[in-house]
Image (cartoon, coloured by chain):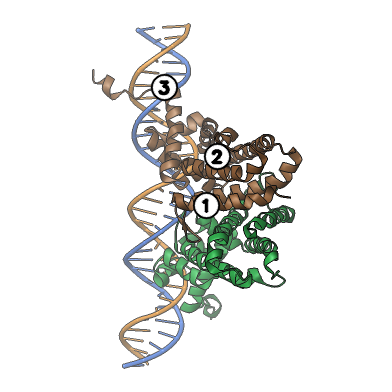
Chain colours: A green, B brown, C blue, D orange
DNA sequence: CATACATGTCACCGACTGGTGACATGCATA
DNA sequence: TATGCATGTCACCAGTCGGTGACATGTATG
């Protein structure tokens, strides 16, 4: 009968759940967090919004499910990959490289940028997941850097910690902002040249963190 | 008659326009940019949304009118007010003080913080006004600092410019973010203590900007 | 006084939102 | 084979949104 071709709607809960979760990610990546809603996600998944309520309980729970499948943030290894200077006197260059890689990571991960933007206007399962992940990975990174360059942990936490917060915050801001407003202080933040200049500046400033 | 007490609705275009403009500012300050809409603004102004269309043409034009009445950003004088170090060797401390005052300004101007947050998800008359204002004032600040500390303008633009962009971006990010998510890298950004630590870090890093 | 206009008020429209009940259909089990 | 349940589909609800037309009323002008 014609049934076979028509009624081919998968009829499998796991598949529908998976399609809903990936659809959410696609919406975020393509349209931004402003476009997220039960209707849009269900349409993108090719199913009905009723499934969101039946299988997840609601949009917040679907968002939570999505947050558990994804990995939004870098791992310390990503930023400390070779080639990276080792000796203590090269620490400023290493910091600049970490800065560069942090920026490159974000510029290559649009969903993370959207969630970072979301954090500015709303708290939800996704932003809380990213927040928790970033806090943990930042601490790990700091410890890893201290270990690699032979700094005492408490000293690193006192001196390097706030500096990493400052520089990291700057990267988060400038990359997130650049999606819609590329110009900042006369620089085009979508260009590699601007980021090279910024990285150079970081290298120079980082020198003062190690000296005396 | 009872007319006088009942029909006291001002019946004056200028007054209604002014109430609409101030109502927009109140909505932004109290509820954030997500709550801005013709219905909400008209209700806050105690009038009818028809007036927004009749007198301004629509919400975007009302927003534009509001943007022309307000002054969202610091002036260079605000950040360079006395007491501020003068001598070239004190430049790092001056930079740290500018950083502190930038942060203090934003923490005291919730509407500006909301517009900064808005920039992350949307472009409109308000965000463009703030963008233009900030770009201009930043350039003025840089020139003023160069003048005050006897730096050649092109040198200042090359070395101090990117550093100001980095530090300023960090302040924008951390203050805007702290409205909803105060914790960042283990610091409570609503506390003065955290900002004191950050300022100290800036002072240390700025030393490397002047040396050699 | 009578006319014309500006101001303010109200009701309504279509579109979209989140959310729910009712129903058809297929599969697994008794 | 027949019953029960899970899956999927559709229609509908109430609420809000931006936007507009129609009307009442006050004021200034002829």
Question: What quarter of the picture does the C terminus of chain A occupy?
Answer: bottom right
Image coordinates for residue B186, horizontal then vertical, percent:
48, 61
Could you tell me which chain the residue with mark 3 belongs to? B
Mark nearer the viewer, 1 or 3: 1
- Of marks 1 and 2, which one's residue comes earlier in the chain? 2
Of residue B118 and residue B96, the one placed in the foreground of this image is B96
Q: Is residue B108 left or right of residue B148?
A: left
The answer for which chain carries disc 1 is B
Q: What secondary structure is marked by label 2? A: helix
Residue denoted by label 2: B126
In front of the other: label 3 or label 2?
2
Which residue is disc 1 drawn over?
Answer: B174
Horizontal and vertical percent for residue A139? Answer: 53, 67
Q: Nearer the viewer, residue A92 or A132?
A: A92
Residue at the spot x=53%, y=77% of the render? Answer: A8
Q: Which residue is mark 3?
A: B12
């Amino acid at each position: 009968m014609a049934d076979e071709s028509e009624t081919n709607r998968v009829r499998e809960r796991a598949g529908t759940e998976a399609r809903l979760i990936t659809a959410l990610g696609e919406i975020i990546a393509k349209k931004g967090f402003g476009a997220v809603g039960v209707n849009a996600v269900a349409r993108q998944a090719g199913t009905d919004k009723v499934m969101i309520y039946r299988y997840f309980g609601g949009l917040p729970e679907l968002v939570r499910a999505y947050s558990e499948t994804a990995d939004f943030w870098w791992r310390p290894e990503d930023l400390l990959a070779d080639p990276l200077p080792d000796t203590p006197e090269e620490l400023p260059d290493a910091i600049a490289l970490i800065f560069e890689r942090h920026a490159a990571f974000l510029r290559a991960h649009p969903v993370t940028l959207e969630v970072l933007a979301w954090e500015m206007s709303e708290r939800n399962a996704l932003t809380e997941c990213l927040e928790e992940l970033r806090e943990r990975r930042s601490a790990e990174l700091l410890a890893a850097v201290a270990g690699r360059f032979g700094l005492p942990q408490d000293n690193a936490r006192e001196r390097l910690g706030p500096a990493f917060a400052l520089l990291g915050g700057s990267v988060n801001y400038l990359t997130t902002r650049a999606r819609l407003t590329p110009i900042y202080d006369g620089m085009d933040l979508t260009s590699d040249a601007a980021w090279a200049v910024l990285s150079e500046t970081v290298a120079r400033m980082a020198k003062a963190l190690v000296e005396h």
